[in-house]
Image (cartoon, helix red, strand yellow):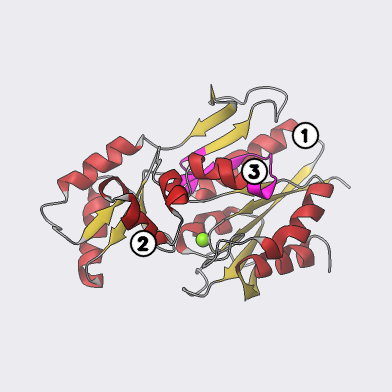
Amino acid sequence: MNNEILVFSDLDGTLLDHHTYSFAAAVPTLDKLAEQNIPVIPTTSKTYAELKQIRSDLGLQTPFIVENGAAIFIPEGFFNEQPKDTLAKNGFWIKEFSKPVAYWRGLLDTLKGEFDGQFNHFANMTNAEIVDATGLSQAQAELASAREYGEPILWLGDQDTKVLFLKALENLGAKPLQGGRFLHLSGECDKGKALIWLKKLFQSTKANKEYTSIALGDGQNDVAMLNAADIAVRILSPVNEPPILTKENDVHTTKRFGPEGWADSLNHIIFNC
Ligand SMILES: [Mg+2]
């Protein structure tokens, strides 16, 4: 078979249960994908520090995409040679799409007068506040706050003011993205651009194979990735409607939430069961 599959998967609410962060229901399918050498590429709003732990829990040695497409981490040696436009650091080849987080925090500082008390953001939050807002454990919250590229914002005000706030950010050249809990502030990067870049890279290493990308996600920050994939899977969410896509063909929507829906859809699409 000359067809190779790449699975790009969101984590929170998709491969990980929205409430418990468990991926137990996906384990048999993860095992089958590993047996077939089909890479599962975590594509997430989470940080590199968080991914280090989660990859080892998931038993994945594949590339991964952090902070909503701000950077792609490829384990050194995963491809025969270091890909162009990447830097080598901590055992990874890293492709960066965003300015560093300090830049975005500086932008937020300029809006603190106008939107006084209406938002909070990670750099400004104590670990306990992050635990409260996310349901993460203390240790997990520490990893989550190790941002390198983008800054999560917790909106505290009303919806009308939020619209003005989003406008103000866009006027400053930012591209805020709504995730399940947080607004994510970064530049012109998203999960879709990262998917396209990485799929091209895989394709360039095997000219005689045709790569098909399957993307799975449950939220607004997955829209670009789902639209960019050959096959899109919208994972049913207990907290929001399935994201609306411009892509019309090869769009699936699961009947079950999170990792159960994740496993159902990949079993159906890849393994015909
Ligand atoms: Mg999600």
Q: Which three-letter amino acid code belongs to the residue tagged 1?
A: Ala
Badge 3 is on which residue?
56
Query: Magenta region: which residues?
Result: 57-71
Left or right, residue 227 beside residue 207: left
**Can residue 189 be seen at all in this image of the molecule?**
no
Task: Tell whether label 2 touches label 1 (CB within 8 Å).
Answer: no
Badge 2 is on which residue?
132
Q: Kindly identify which numbered label has been placed on residue 207.
A: 1
Taking the spot 49% from the left edge, 64% from the top edge, the residue there is 219
Q: Quadrant of residue 26?
A: bottom right
Under circle 2, the secondary element is: helix
CA–CA distance between discs 1 and 2? 49 Å
Q: Earlier in the sequence, mark 1 or mark 3?
A: 3
Taking the spot 52% from the left edge, 32% from the top edge, the residue there is 95
Q: Earlier in the sequence, mark 2 or mark 3?
A: 3
Q: Nearer the viewer, residue 3 or 254?
A: 254
Q: Kindly identify which numbered label has been placed on residue 32.
A: none
CA–CA distance between discs 2 and 3? 25 Å
Above or below, 204 relative to 170: above
